[in-house]
Amino acid sequence: MREILLYETTSGNNPVANYIDGLDAKTNAKVARALDLLEEYGVAIGPPHVKPLPGTDRLWELRVPFGGQAYCLLFFPDGQKIVLLHGFTKKSQKLPGKELQTAISRMKEYLRRR
């Protein structure tokens, strides 16, 4: 069993929790179930739920398809912890560069502070 950590900014904001909390109840429940699976199995869940992001050292994407949308959480494994860095709603198959950059900068910040 892994521990899921939500990235927190230096000022104490928790953008991933804010994203999840902003989802409607049914979507929130689907995301919570996916996080339960991630906590239990880690990246071993594999596709289509979890996949590594090419061109990054350690970043992974958790996709939660629901209601014609894809709810995505970008994360990286850190020992027995899984650090959720960024959450967003994906409109297409392609990962927007802006979303990837947000996750990369948060990962660097997290690792610097650790």
Image: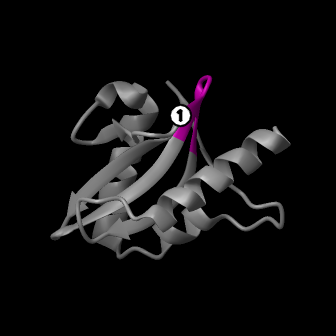
Tell me the quarter of the picture where residue 51 sits: top left
Asked if the stretch drawn in magenta spans residue 78, the answer is yes
Q: Residue at x 83, y 60 (%)?
A: 10
On screen, residue 85 above or below 99 = above
Q: Kindly identify the amino acid type of the residue bearing the numbered disc 1.
A: Arg
42 lies left or right of 8: left
In this view of the protein, which residue sits in the foreground, 25 or 11? 11
Classify mark 1: helix, strand or loop. loop
- The figure's colour scheme reads one colour
Q: Residue at x 33, y 39 (%)?
A: 50
Report crowding for label 1: few under 14, some 14 to 19, many 20 or more residues within 10 A (C-alpha). some
The image quadrant where one finds the C terminus is top right
Between 110 and 64, the one nearer to me in the picture: 110
Q: Residue shown at 40%/37% (left/top)?
A: 38
In this view, which residue lies farthest toward the left? Answer: 68
Reply above or below: 70 against 91: above
Range drawn in magenta? 76-83
Q: Could you tell me residue 49's position as x and y percent? A: 27, 42
Kindly report the secondary structure that dominates the magenta region of the rendered protein. Answer: strand
Q: Is residue 104 left or right of residue 66?
A: right
Horizontally, residue 71 falls left or right of residue 114, namely: left
Residue position marked by numbered label 1 in the rendering: 58
**Residue 62, image x, y percentages:** 37, 47
Query: Residue 63 appears at what percent x and percent y?
Result: 31, 51
The number of numbered discs placed on residues in the rendered structure image is: 1
Q: Is residue 91 magenta?
A: no
- Compared to 23, does 96 lie above or below? above
Q: Residue furthest front?
A: 55
Instruction: Give percent across and percent down for residue 8.
Output: 71, 57
Q: Is residue 2 left or right of residue 33?
A: right
